[in-house]
Image (cartoon, coloured by chain):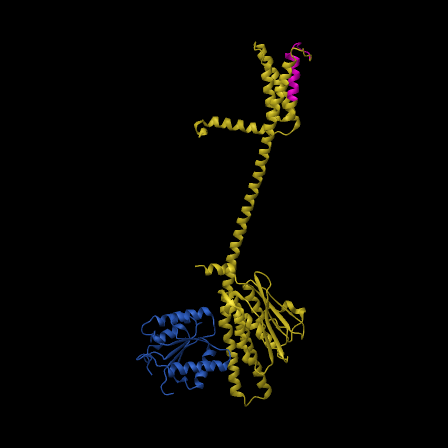
Amino acid sequence: MTELAEGPTQVGVRRSLAYWNQELQRIHSPILRYGFSVVSVAVALGVAFALQHYQFRDVELPVLTVAIAFTTWYAGAGPSVLAVLLSAACFDYFFIEPLYSFDISVRDLPYFLIFVAWAAIVASFSAVRRRIEDNLRQARDSLQVEVEQRRHREEEIRKLNQELGKRAVELEATNKELESFAYSVSHDLRAPLRHMVGYSELLQRQASSSLDEKSQRFIQTILNSAKRMGNLIDDLLAFSRIGRAETKKTKVDLKQLVDEVVAEIRPDTKGRDIAWKIGALPVCYGDRSMLRLVVVNLVSNAVKFTRMREPAEIEIGCDDRNEEEVEVFVRDNGAGFDMQYVNKLFGVFQRLHLPEQFEGTGIGLATVQRIVHRHGGQVRGEAAVDQGATFYFSLPKLQYAGERTANAP
Amino acid sequence: MTILGRILIVEDDPNDVELTLTALADYNLANEVVVTRDGQQALDYLYCRGEFSTRATGNPAVMLLDLKLPKIGGLEVLQQIKSDESLKMIPVVVLTSSNEEKDMMRSYKLGVNAYVVKPVDFHEFVNAVKELGVFWAVINEPPPGSVQK
Protein backbone atom coordinates (compact mmCIF):
# COMPACT_ATOMS: atom_id res chain seq x y z
CA MET A 1 0.00 0.00 0.00
CA THR A 2 2.81 2.41 0.89
CA GLU A 3 4.54 1.51 -2.33
CA LEU A 4 1.44 2.49 -4.27
CA ALA A 5 1.36 5.86 -2.56
CA GLU A 6 4.96 6.54 -3.61
CA GLY A 7 5.97 7.32 -7.17
CA PRO A 8 7.78 4.71 -9.21
CA THR A 9 11.14 6.55 -8.90
CA GLN A 10 10.95 6.60 -5.11
CA VAL A 11 10.16 2.94 -5.06
CA GLY A 12 13.17 2.35 -7.35
CA VAL A 13 15.48 4.36 -5.14
CA ARG A 14 14.25 2.62 -2.01
CA ARG A 15 14.77 -0.76 -3.61
CA SER A 16 18.29 0.00 -4.87
CA LEU A 17 19.25 1.42 -1.43
CA ALA A 18 17.99 -1.76 0.18
CA TYR A 19 19.98 -3.72 -2.38
CA TRP A 20 23.26 -1.91 -1.67
CA ASN A 21 22.62 -2.09 2.04
CA GLN A 22 22.34 -5.86 1.75
CA GLU A 23 25.30 -6.21 -0.60
CA LEU A 24 27.59 -4.23 1.71
CA GLN A 25 26.56 -6.37 4.69
CA ARG A 26 27.44 -9.47 2.75
CA ILE A 27 31.08 -8.51 2.24
CA HIS A 28 33.27 -11.22 3.70
CA SER A 29 36.78 -10.29 2.55
CA PRO A 30 38.74 -9.15 5.71
CA ILE A 31 40.73 -6.58 3.70
CA LEU A 32 37.54 -4.85 2.55
CA ARG A 33 35.99 -5.02 6.01
CA TYR A 34 39.00 -3.59 7.85
CA GLY A 35 39.49 -1.10 5.01
CA PHE A 36 35.90 0.01 5.52
CA SER A 37 36.74 0.58 9.16
CA VAL A 38 39.80 2.77 8.36
CA VAL A 39 38.00 4.68 5.60
CA SER A 40 34.94 5.45 7.71
CA VAL A 41 37.07 6.73 10.60
CA ALA A 42 39.08 8.87 8.13
CA VAL A 43 35.89 10.25 6.57
CA ALA A 44 34.48 11.01 10.04
CA LEU A 45 37.71 12.77 10.92
CA GLY A 46 37.51 14.86 7.74
CA VAL A 47 33.88 15.76 8.44
CA ALA A 48 34.77 16.71 12.01
CA PHE A 49 37.58 18.96 10.81
CA ALA A 50 35.33 20.56 8.19
CA LEU A 51 32.63 21.24 10.74
CA GLN A 52 35.21 22.65 13.12
CA HIS A 53 36.39 24.93 10.36
CA TYR A 54 32.87 26.34 10.13
CA GLN A 55 32.91 27.09 13.86
CA PHE A 56 30.97 24.08 15.06
CA ARG A 57 32.18 22.90 18.49
CA ASP A 58 32.33 19.45 20.07
CA VAL A 59 31.14 17.62 16.94
CA GLU A 60 34.04 15.13 16.78
CA LEU A 61 32.55 12.73 19.34
CA PRO A 62 29.16 12.12 17.65
CA VAL A 63 30.77 12.02 14.18
CA LEU A 64 33.33 9.37 15.21
CA THR A 65 30.59 7.39 17.00
CA VAL A 66 28.59 7.39 13.80
CA ALA A 67 31.68 6.07 11.96
CA ILE A 68 32.04 3.28 14.54
CA ALA A 69 28.33 2.43 14.23
CA PHE A 70 28.59 2.30 10.44
CA THR A 71 31.64 0.06 10.61
CA THR A 72 29.94 -2.30 13.04
CA TRP A 73 26.82 -2.34 10.95
CA TYR A 74 28.53 -3.14 7.70
CA ALA A 75 31.86 -4.75 8.56
CA GLY A 76 31.29 -6.66 11.81
CA ALA A 77 32.92 -7.00 15.24
CA GLY A 78 36.68 -7.05 14.41
CA PRO A 79 36.66 -3.93 12.19
CA SER A 80 34.46 -2.17 14.75
CA VAL A 81 37.09 -2.79 17.47
CA LEU A 82 39.66 -1.36 15.07
CA ALA A 83 37.37 1.64 14.45
CA VAL A 84 37.02 2.17 18.21
CA LEU A 85 40.81 2.07 18.66
CA LEU A 86 41.43 4.36 15.69
CA SER A 87 38.74 6.82 16.80
CA ALA A 88 40.10 6.81 20.35
CA ALA A 89 43.59 7.50 19.02
CA CYS A 90 42.40 10.28 16.67
CA PHE A 91 40.18 11.74 19.36
CA ASP A 92 43.11 11.81 21.77
CA TYR A 93 45.52 13.10 19.14
CA PHE A 94 43.45 15.79 17.48
CA PHE A 95 40.83 16.91 19.95
CA ILE A 96 42.11 16.44 23.52
CA GLU A 97 44.52 18.87 25.09
CA PRO A 98 47.41 18.83 24.55
CA LEU A 99 46.58 18.71 20.84
CA TYR A 100 48.73 16.66 18.41
CA SER A 101 50.00 14.38 21.13
CA PHE A 102 48.83 11.11 22.60
CA ASP A 103 49.21 12.41 26.13
CA ILE A 104 46.05 12.79 28.13
CA SER A 105 45.75 15.24 30.97
CA VAL A 106 44.18 13.83 34.17
CA ARG A 107 41.31 16.28 33.75
CA ASP A 108 40.36 14.85 30.38
CA LEU A 109 40.89 11.20 31.25
CA PRO A 110 37.27 10.43 32.38
CA TYR A 111 36.01 12.21 29.28
CA PHE A 112 38.21 9.99 27.12
CA LEU A 113 37.28 6.80 29.01
CA ILE A 114 33.59 7.57 28.65
CA PHE A 115 34.12 7.94 24.90
CA VAL A 116 35.90 4.55 24.71
CA ALA A 117 33.19 2.85 26.82
CA TRP A 118 30.40 4.40 24.78
CA ALA A 119 32.09 3.37 21.55
CA ALA A 120 32.59 -0.16 22.87
CA ILE A 121 28.89 -0.47 23.83
CA VAL A 122 27.78 0.68 20.39
CA ALA A 123 30.24 -1.76 18.85
CA SER A 124 29.08 -4.73 20.93
CA PHE A 125 25.36 -4.01 20.38
CA SER A 126 25.96 -3.77 16.66
CA ALA A 127 28.01 -6.96 16.73
CA VAL A 128 25.16 -8.83 18.43
CA ARG A 129 22.73 -7.47 15.90
CA ARG A 130 25.04 -8.53 13.11
CA ARG A 131 25.40 -12.04 14.49
CA ILE A 132 21.65 -12.43 14.77
CA GLU A 133 21.25 -11.14 11.25
CA ASP A 134 23.89 -13.54 10.02
CA ASN A 135 22.08 -16.44 11.63
CA LEU A 136 18.80 -15.31 10.12
CA ARG A 137 20.40 -15.02 6.71
CA GLN A 138 21.88 -18.48 7.00
CA ALA A 139 18.53 -19.89 8.05
CA ARG A 140 16.88 -18.14 5.12
CA ASP A 141 19.51 -19.47 2.71
CA SER A 142 19.14 -23.06 3.91
CA LEU A 143 15.38 -22.66 3.74
CA GLN A 144 15.74 -21.48 0.17
CA VAL A 145 17.90 -24.50 -0.62
CA GLU A 146 15.28 -26.74 0.94
CA VAL A 147 12.49 -25.09 -1.01
CA GLU A 148 14.53 -25.53 -4.16
CA GLN A 149 15.13 -29.20 -3.36
CA ARG A 150 11.47 -29.71 -2.63
CA ARG A 151 10.58 -28.11 -5.93
CA HIS A 152 13.01 -30.50 -7.60
CA ARG A 153 11.49 -33.48 -5.83
CA GLU A 154 8.00 -32.37 -6.75
CA GLU A 155 9.09 -32.03 -10.35
CA GLU A 156 10.57 -35.53 -10.18
CA ILE A 157 7.38 -36.93 -8.66
CA ARG A 158 5.36 -35.24 -11.36
CA LYS A 159 7.58 -36.80 -14.03
CA LEU A 160 7.36 -40.23 -12.42
CA ASN A 161 3.59 -39.92 -12.23
CA GLN A 162 3.46 -39.03 -15.90
CA GLU A 163 5.64 -42.02 -16.68
CA LEU A 164 3.39 -44.20 -14.57
CA GLY A 165 0.32 -42.94 -16.39
CA LYS A 166 1.95 -43.76 -19.71
CA ARG A 167 2.84 -47.22 -18.44
CA ALA A 168 -0.74 -47.78 -17.31
CA VAL A 169 -2.01 -46.88 -20.75
CA GLU A 170 0.54 -49.19 -22.36
CA LEU A 171 -0.36 -51.94 -19.96
CA GLU A 172 -4.01 -51.54 -20.75
CA ALA A 173 -3.26 -51.75 -24.46
CA THR A 174 -1.17 -54.87 -23.92
CA ASN A 175 -3.94 -56.38 -21.85
CA LYS A 176 -6.46 -55.66 -24.59
CA GLU A 177 -4.14 -57.26 -27.12
CA LEU A 178 -3.73 -60.27 -24.90
CA GLU A 179 -7.46 -60.54 -24.52
CA SER A 180 -8.07 -60.43 -28.25
CA PHE A 181 -5.25 -62.92 -28.69
CA ALA A 182 -6.90 -65.31 -26.24
CA TYR A 183 -10.23 -64.74 -27.97
CA SER A 184 -8.76 -65.54 -31.35
CA VAL A 185 -7.00 -68.63 -29.99
CA SER A 186 -10.20 -69.87 -28.48
CA HIS A 187 -12.12 -69.33 -31.73
CA ASP A 188 -9.70 -70.05 -34.51
CA LEU A 189 -7.24 -72.55 -33.12
CA ARG A 190 -9.84 -75.04 -31.97
CA ALA A 191 -11.62 -75.28 -35.31
CA PRO A 192 -8.79 -76.96 -37.28
CA LEU A 193 -8.22 -79.31 -34.37
CA ARG A 194 -11.83 -80.30 -34.40
CA HIS A 195 -11.54 -80.99 -38.12
CA MET A 196 -8.44 -83.12 -37.63
CA VAL A 197 -10.20 -85.18 -35.00
CA GLY A 198 -13.43 -85.34 -36.97
CA TYR A 199 -11.93 -86.44 -40.27
CA SER A 200 -9.54 -88.88 -38.59
CA GLU A 201 -12.49 -90.53 -36.92
CA LEU A 202 -14.44 -90.56 -40.14
CA LEU A 203 -11.45 -92.15 -41.82
CA GLN A 204 -11.17 -94.68 -39.05
CA ARG A 205 -14.84 -95.48 -39.42
CA GLN A 206 -14.87 -95.79 -43.20
CA ALA A 207 -11.56 -97.53 -43.83
CA SER A 208 -10.98 -99.57 -40.70
CA SER A 209 -11.54 -102.84 -42.55
CA SER A 210 -9.08 -102.00 -45.33
CA LEU A 211 -6.33 -100.55 -43.11
CA ASP A 212 -3.61 -102.68 -41.54
CA GLU A 213 -2.82 -102.50 -37.86
CA LYS A 214 0.04 -100.03 -38.29
CA SER A 215 -2.07 -97.54 -40.26
CA GLN A 216 -4.80 -97.83 -37.67
CA ARG A 217 -2.25 -97.02 -34.98
CA PHE A 218 -1.14 -93.96 -36.99
CA ILE A 219 -4.68 -92.68 -37.15
CA GLN A 220 -5.09 -93.31 -33.45
CA THR A 221 -1.91 -91.29 -32.77
CA ILE A 222 -3.20 -88.37 -34.86
CA LEU A 223 -6.42 -88.50 -32.86
CA ASN A 224 -4.68 -88.65 -29.49
CA SER A 225 -2.33 -85.81 -30.35
CA ALA A 226 -5.10 -83.57 -31.64
CA LYS A 227 -7.16 -84.24 -28.52
CA ARG A 228 -4.15 -83.56 -26.34
CA MET A 229 -3.58 -80.27 -28.13
CA GLY A 230 -7.23 -79.43 -27.57
CA ASN A 231 -6.75 -80.04 -23.86
CA LEU A 232 -3.62 -77.90 -23.82
CA ILE A 233 -5.40 -75.02 -25.51
CA ASP A 234 -8.34 -75.30 -23.14
CA ASP A 235 -6.04 -75.37 -20.11
CA LEU A 236 -4.02 -72.44 -21.36
CA LEU A 237 -7.15 -70.39 -22.01
CA ALA A 238 -8.52 -71.24 -18.58
CA PHE A 239 -5.16 -70.25 -17.09
CA SER A 240 -5.12 -66.92 -18.89
CA ARG A 241 -8.70 -66.29 -17.81
CA ILE A 242 -7.70 -66.63 -14.15
CA GLY A 243 -5.24 -63.81 -14.64
CA ARG A 244 -7.91 -61.54 -16.11
CA ALA A 245 -10.93 -62.50 -14.02
CA GLU A 246 -11.94 -60.29 -11.12
CA THR A 247 -11.60 -61.80 -7.68
CA LYS A 248 -14.73 -61.75 -5.56
CA LYS A 249 -13.41 -61.99 -2.03
CA THR A 250 -15.47 -63.26 0.88
CA LYS A 251 -14.97 -65.28 4.06
CA VAL A 252 -13.98 -68.80 3.06
CA ASP A 253 -14.03 -71.70 5.50
CA LEU A 254 -11.02 -73.70 4.28
CA LYS A 255 -11.97 -76.77 6.31
CA GLN A 256 -15.37 -76.92 4.66
CA LEU A 257 -13.80 -76.31 1.25
CA VAL A 258 -11.23 -79.08 1.65
CA ASP A 259 -13.84 -81.56 2.94
CA GLU A 260 -15.99 -80.75 -0.08
CA VAL A 261 -13.15 -81.26 -2.55
CA VAL A 262 -11.99 -84.51 -0.94
CA ALA A 263 -15.55 -85.85 -0.96
CA GLU A 264 -15.74 -85.02 -4.65
CA ILE A 265 -12.46 -86.73 -5.52
CA ARG A 266 -13.03 -89.84 -3.37
CA PRO A 267 -15.28 -91.71 -5.83
CA ASP A 268 -12.45 -91.59 -8.39
CA THR A 269 -10.10 -93.32 -5.95
CA LYS A 270 -12.20 -96.47 -5.55
CA GLY A 271 -10.02 -99.56 -5.20
CA ARG A 272 -7.15 -97.57 -3.79
CA ASP A 273 -6.02 -97.49 -0.20
CA ILE A 274 -5.67 -93.84 0.77
CA ALA A 275 -5.31 -92.67 4.37
CA TRP A 276 -6.71 -89.13 4.46
CA LYS A 277 -5.65 -86.93 7.33
CA ILE A 278 -7.33 -83.55 7.40
CA GLY A 279 -6.31 -81.23 10.22
CA ALA A 280 -7.95 -78.08 11.53
CA LEU A 281 -8.10 -75.32 8.93
CA PRO A 282 -8.90 -71.67 9.44
CA VAL A 283 -11.40 -69.35 7.89
CA CYS A 284 -9.64 -67.06 5.47
CA TYR A 285 -10.43 -64.27 3.08
CA GLY A 286 -10.49 -64.89 -0.66
CA ASP A 287 -12.36 -65.82 -3.83
CA ARG A 288 -14.08 -69.10 -3.06
CA SER A 289 -14.20 -70.58 -6.55
CA MET A 290 -10.56 -69.72 -7.20
CA LEU A 291 -9.40 -71.13 -3.86
CA ARG A 292 -11.43 -74.23 -4.64
CA LEU A 293 -9.41 -74.62 -7.83
CA VAL A 294 -6.20 -74.39 -5.77
CA VAL A 295 -7.35 -77.14 -3.42
CA VAL A 296 -8.66 -79.31 -6.29
CA ASN A 297 -5.34 -79.04 -8.12
CA LEU A 298 -3.19 -79.83 -5.09
CA VAL A 299 -5.37 -82.67 -3.81
CA SER A 300 -5.77 -84.32 -7.21
CA ASN A 301 -2.01 -84.00 -7.71
CA ALA A 302 -1.49 -85.78 -4.39
CA VAL A 303 -3.90 -88.52 -5.48
CA LYS A 304 -2.21 -88.84 -8.86
CA PHE A 305 1.37 -88.99 -7.63
CA THR A 306 0.63 -91.55 -4.89
CA ARG A 307 -0.84 -93.98 -7.41
CA MET A 308 1.85 -96.62 -6.76
CA ARG A 309 1.70 -96.35 -2.94
CA GLU A 310 -0.17 -98.86 -0.79
CA PRO A 311 -1.35 -97.32 1.42
CA ALA A 312 -1.13 -93.76 0.17
CA GLU A 313 -1.07 -91.06 2.79
CA ILE A 314 -2.41 -87.60 2.09
CA GLU A 315 -2.37 -84.99 4.81
CA ILE A 316 -3.89 -81.54 4.65
CA GLY A 317 -3.28 -79.09 7.46
CA CYS A 318 -2.04 -75.67 8.32
CA ASP A 319 0.66 -73.79 10.17
CA ASP A 320 -0.35 -70.65 12.01
CA ARG A 321 2.48 -68.49 10.76
CA ASN A 322 1.78 -65.04 12.16
CA GLU A 323 -0.89 -62.42 12.73
CA GLU A 324 -1.63 -61.80 9.07
CA GLU A 325 -1.04 -65.05 7.23
CA VAL A 326 -1.91 -68.68 7.44
CA GLU A 327 -0.01 -71.39 5.56
CA VAL A 328 -1.86 -74.43 4.32
CA PHE A 329 -0.03 -77.57 3.25
CA VAL A 330 -0.90 -80.70 1.26
CA ARG A 331 1.51 -83.54 1.96
CA ASP A 332 1.70 -86.94 0.27
CA ASN A 333 3.98 -89.94 0.31
CA GLY A 334 4.04 -90.28 -3.46
CA ALA A 335 6.61 -90.00 -6.23
CA GLY A 336 7.95 -86.64 -5.06
CA PHE A 337 10.49 -84.82 -7.21
CA ASP A 338 14.12 -83.79 -7.26
CA MET A 339 14.58 -80.46 -5.42
CA GLN A 340 17.09 -79.55 -8.11
CA TYR A 341 14.15 -78.74 -10.39
CA VAL A 342 12.07 -76.94 -7.79
CA ASN A 343 12.27 -73.66 -9.77
CA LYS A 344 10.43 -75.30 -12.68
CA LEU A 345 7.63 -76.56 -10.50
CA PHE A 346 5.18 -73.70 -10.97
CA GLY A 347 5.94 -72.90 -14.61
CA VAL A 348 3.31 -73.19 -17.33
CA PHE A 349 3.46 -76.56 -19.12
CA GLN A 350 6.45 -77.58 -16.99
CA ARG A 351 6.44 -81.23 -16.05
CA LEU A 352 8.88 -83.18 -13.92
CA HIS A 353 7.56 -86.62 -14.95
CA LEU A 354 7.15 -88.47 -18.20
CA PRO A 355 3.67 -88.56 -19.71
CA GLU A 356 3.73 -92.37 -19.52
CA GLN A 357 4.29 -92.16 -15.76
CA PHE A 358 1.77 -89.49 -14.87
CA GLU A 359 -0.67 -87.86 -17.25
CA GLY A 360 -1.39 -84.12 -17.26
CA THR A 361 -0.74 -80.93 -19.17
CA GLY A 362 1.47 -79.20 -16.62
CA ILE A 363 -0.83 -76.29 -15.96
CA GLY A 364 -2.15 -77.25 -12.49
CA LEU A 365 0.59 -75.82 -10.31
CA ALA A 366 0.93 -72.75 -12.54
CA THR A 367 -2.77 -72.13 -11.92
CA VAL A 368 -2.27 -72.65 -8.18
CA GLN A 369 0.56 -70.14 -8.13
CA ARG A 370 -1.33 -67.56 -10.13
CA ILE A 371 -4.39 -67.75 -7.88
CA VAL A 372 -2.37 -67.62 -4.66
CA HIS A 373 -0.34 -64.67 -5.94
CA ARG A 374 -3.54 -62.87 -6.81
CA HIS A 375 -4.55 -63.34 -3.17
CA GLY A 376 -1.26 -61.84 -2.00
CA GLY A 377 0.11 -65.19 -0.82
CA GLN A 378 3.08 -67.40 -1.66
CA VAL A 379 3.47 -70.98 -2.87
CA ARG A 380 6.34 -73.40 -2.41
CA GLY A 381 7.01 -77.10 -2.69
CA GLU A 382 9.33 -79.46 -0.84
CA ALA A 383 10.07 -83.01 -1.82
CA ALA A 384 12.56 -85.77 -2.38
CA VAL A 385 12.44 -88.41 -5.10
CA ASP A 386 10.20 -91.28 -3.98
CA GLN A 387 9.82 -89.70 -0.52
CA GLY A 388 6.62 -87.76 -1.22
CA ALA A 389 6.02 -84.06 -1.68
CA THR A 390 4.57 -81.22 0.37
CA PHE A 391 3.03 -78.14 -1.20
CA TYR A 392 2.46 -75.00 0.83
CA PHE A 393 0.40 -71.95 0.07
CA SER A 394 -0.09 -68.93 2.28
CA LEU A 395 -3.17 -66.74 2.47
CA PRO A 396 -4.07 -63.57 4.33
CA LYS A 397 -6.11 -64.26 7.44
CA LEU A 398 -9.63 -62.98 7.71
CA GLN A 399 -9.19 -59.25 8.17
CA TYR A 400 -10.47 -58.52 11.62
CA ALA A 401 -10.76 -54.82 11.00
CA GLY A 402 -12.84 -55.43 7.88
CA GLU A 403 -15.03 -57.90 9.73
CA ARG A 404 -15.73 -55.46 12.54
CA THR A 405 -16.89 -52.74 10.20
CA ALA A 406 -19.03 -55.24 8.33
CA ASN A 407 -20.71 -56.34 11.57
CA ALA A 408 -21.23 -52.85 12.88
CA PRO A 409 -24.91 -51.87 13.13
CA MET B 1 -38.85 -89.34 -37.82
CA THR B 2 -41.78 -88.25 -39.90
CA ILE B 3 -42.41 -84.81 -38.52
CA LEU B 4 -39.24 -82.97 -39.07
CA GLY B 5 -38.73 -79.23 -39.05
CA ARG B 6 -36.22 -77.58 -41.29
CA ILE B 7 -32.79 -76.91 -39.79
CA LEU B 8 -30.95 -73.75 -40.85
CA ILE B 9 -27.19 -73.98 -40.46
CA VAL B 10 -25.13 -70.78 -40.60
CA GLU B 11 -21.50 -71.83 -40.87
CA ASP B 12 -18.64 -70.43 -42.94
CA ASP B 13 -16.18 -73.31 -42.56
CA PRO B 14 -16.79 -76.04 -45.21
CA ASN B 15 -15.24 -78.71 -42.96
CA ASP B 16 -17.56 -77.81 -40.12
CA VAL B 17 -20.48 -77.89 -42.53
CA GLU B 18 -19.52 -81.36 -43.72
CA LEU B 19 -18.95 -82.68 -40.21
CA THR B 20 -22.25 -81.23 -39.01
CA LEU B 21 -24.12 -82.69 -41.99
CA THR B 22 -22.42 -86.05 -41.42
CA ALA B 23 -23.47 -86.01 -37.80
CA LEU B 24 -27.06 -85.13 -38.73
CA ALA B 25 -27.09 -87.80 -41.48
CA ASP B 26 -25.99 -90.40 -38.93
CA TYR B 27 -29.30 -89.89 -37.23
CA ASN B 28 -31.44 -89.33 -40.34
CA LEU B 29 -31.88 -85.67 -39.51
CA ALA B 30 -30.27 -84.34 -42.67
CA ASN B 31 -33.21 -84.37 -45.07
CA GLU B 32 -34.35 -80.82 -44.41
CA VAL B 33 -31.19 -78.87 -43.81
CA VAL B 34 -30.41 -75.50 -45.31
CA VAL B 35 -26.83 -74.30 -45.19
CA THR B 36 -25.93 -70.64 -45.42
CA ARG B 37 -22.32 -69.54 -45.34
CA ASP B 38 -22.41 -66.07 -43.82
CA GLY B 39 -24.62 -63.71 -41.86
CA GLN B 40 -25.83 -61.89 -44.94
CA GLN B 41 -26.97 -65.11 -46.62
CA ALA B 42 -28.67 -66.29 -43.45
CA LEU B 43 -30.68 -63.08 -43.19
CA ASP B 44 -31.51 -63.29 -46.92
CA TYR B 45 -32.89 -66.77 -46.30
CA LEU B 46 -34.97 -65.69 -43.32
CA TYR B 47 -36.38 -62.65 -45.15
CA CYS B 48 -36.91 -64.63 -48.41
CA ARG B 49 -34.90 -62.15 -50.41
CA GLY B 50 -32.03 -62.30 -52.91
CA GLU B 51 -31.26 -65.87 -53.96
CA PHE B 52 -33.96 -67.13 -51.58
CA SER B 53 -36.78 -64.94 -52.92
CA THR B 54 -38.53 -67.97 -54.40
CA ARG B 55 -38.21 -70.33 -51.45
CA ALA B 56 -41.19 -71.83 -49.68
CA THR B 57 -42.30 -69.52 -46.87
CA GLY B 58 -42.10 -70.35 -43.16
CA ASN B 59 -39.41 -70.21 -40.55
CA PRO B 60 -36.93 -72.98 -39.81
CA ALA B 61 -37.57 -75.16 -36.76
CA VAL B 62 -34.16 -74.23 -35.44
CA MET B 63 -31.17 -72.21 -36.48
CA LEU B 64 -27.64 -73.40 -35.70
CA LEU B 65 -25.58 -70.23 -35.68
CA ASP B 66 -21.80 -69.87 -35.69
CA LEU B 67 -20.45 -66.64 -34.20
CA LYS B 68 -17.39 -65.89 -36.33
CA LEU B 69 -18.82 -65.29 -39.78
CA PRO B 70 -17.79 -63.21 -42.77
CA LYS B 71 -19.71 -59.99 -43.58
CA ILE B 72 -22.36 -59.99 -40.84
CA GLY B 73 -21.22 -61.71 -37.63
CA GLY B 74 -23.26 -64.22 -35.65
CA LEU B 75 -24.04 -61.89 -32.78
CA GLU B 76 -25.37 -59.28 -35.17
CA VAL B 77 -27.54 -61.85 -36.94
CA LEU B 78 -28.85 -62.92 -33.55
CA GLN B 79 -29.62 -59.33 -32.62
CA GLN B 80 -31.53 -58.74 -35.87
CA ILE B 81 -33.56 -61.92 -35.48
CA LYS B 82 -34.47 -61.27 -31.87
CA SER B 83 -35.54 -57.69 -32.60
CA ASP B 84 -37.79 -58.67 -35.52
CA GLU B 85 -41.39 -59.51 -34.61
CA SER B 86 -41.74 -62.14 -37.35
CA LEU B 87 -38.41 -63.86 -36.62
CA LYS B 88 -37.92 -63.56 -32.88
CA MET B 89 -39.76 -66.83 -32.23
CA ILE B 90 -37.24 -68.90 -34.19
CA PRO B 91 -35.19 -70.95 -31.72
CA VAL B 92 -31.56 -69.96 -32.22
CA VAL B 93 -28.75 -72.20 -31.00
CA VAL B 94 -25.28 -70.71 -31.02
CA LEU B 95 -22.88 -73.45 -32.07
CA THR B 96 -19.34 -72.14 -31.86
CA SER B 97 -15.73 -73.06 -31.19
CA SER B 98 -15.27 -70.61 -28.40
CA ASN B 99 -16.31 -70.77 -24.78
CA GLU B 100 -15.47 -67.12 -24.24
CA GLU B 101 -17.55 -65.77 -21.40
CA LYS B 102 -18.00 -62.48 -23.21
CA ASP B 103 -19.69 -64.15 -26.20
CA MET B 104 -21.87 -66.26 -23.93
CA MET B 105 -23.08 -63.32 -21.88
CA ARG B 106 -23.78 -61.27 -24.97
CA SER B 107 -25.66 -64.10 -26.67
CA TYR B 108 -27.88 -64.74 -23.67
CA LYS B 109 -28.56 -61.03 -23.31
CA LEU B 110 -29.69 -60.97 -26.93
CA GLY B 111 -32.07 -63.83 -26.16
CA VAL B 112 -30.35 -66.92 -27.55
CA ASN B 113 -32.21 -70.18 -26.86
CA ALA B 114 -29.12 -72.30 -26.31
CA TYR B 115 -25.36 -71.95 -26.39
CA VAL B 116 -23.27 -74.97 -27.38
CA VAL B 117 -19.48 -75.11 -27.60
CA LYS B 118 -18.38 -77.52 -30.33
CA PRO B 119 -16.44 -80.28 -28.60
CA VAL B 120 -13.02 -81.15 -30.03
CA ASP B 121 -13.77 -84.86 -29.71
CA PHE B 122 -15.71 -86.02 -32.76
CA HIS B 123 -17.93 -88.46 -30.88
CA GLU B 124 -18.96 -85.70 -28.54
CA PHE B 125 -19.49 -83.37 -31.48
CA VAL B 126 -21.72 -85.91 -33.25
CA ASN B 127 -23.64 -86.43 -30.04
CA ALA B 128 -24.09 -82.72 -29.49
CA VAL B 129 -25.34 -82.11 -33.03
CA LYS B 130 -27.64 -85.11 -32.82
CA GLU B 131 -29.12 -84.02 -29.52
CA LEU B 132 -29.66 -80.53 -30.88
CA GLY B 133 -31.25 -81.84 -34.06
CA VAL B 134 -33.50 -84.27 -32.25
CA PHE B 135 -34.51 -81.82 -29.58
CA TRP B 136 -35.22 -78.74 -31.67
CA ALA B 137 -36.40 -80.35 -34.90
CA VAL B 138 -38.36 -83.24 -33.45
CA ILE B 139 -39.16 -83.00 -29.75
CA ASN B 140 -39.65 -79.29 -29.35
CA GLU B 141 -43.04 -77.84 -30.33
CA PRO B 142 -42.44 -74.75 -32.46
CA PRO B 143 -44.55 -71.64 -32.01
CA PRO B 144 -47.93 -72.24 -33.77
CA GLY B 145 -48.08 -71.18 -37.39
CA SER B 146 -44.48 -70.15 -37.73
CA VAL B 147 -42.98 -73.32 -39.13
CA GLN B 148 -43.92 -74.93 -42.38
CA LYS B 149 -43.23 -78.60 -42.22
Residue at horizontal 49%, vertical 72%?
Answer: A188
Magenta: main secondary structure equals helix
Q: Which chain is yellow?
A: A
In the image, is A227 to the left or to the right of A120? left
Q: Is residue A124 above or below residue B42?
A: above
Q: Is residue A123 above or below residue A172?
A: above
Q: Position of residue B25 (x, y in %)?
A: 44, 85
Q: Colour of chain B?
A: blue
Q: Position of residue B110 (x, y in %)?
A: 38, 70
- The reply to whether the magenta stretch includes residue A100 is yes
Q: Nearer the viewer, residue A92 or B29?
A: A92
- The reply to whether the magenta stretch includes residue B8 is no
Q: Is residue A54 above or below residue B96?
A: above
Residue at horizontal 64%, vertical 67%?
Answer: A343
Image: magenta residue range:
A82-101
Q: Nearer the viewer, residue B32 or A331?
A: A331
Quadrant position of residue A269: bottom right
In the image, is A42 to the left or to the right of B76? right
In the image, is A10 to the left or to the right of A129? left
Q: Position of residue B67 (x, y in %)?
A: 43, 72
For the question of whether residue A346 can be seen, the reply is no
Q: Position of residue B109 (x, y in %)?
A: 39, 69
The total of numbered circles placed on residues is 0
Q: Nearer the viewer, residue B115 or A345?
A: A345
For the question of whether residue B119 can be seen, the reply is yes
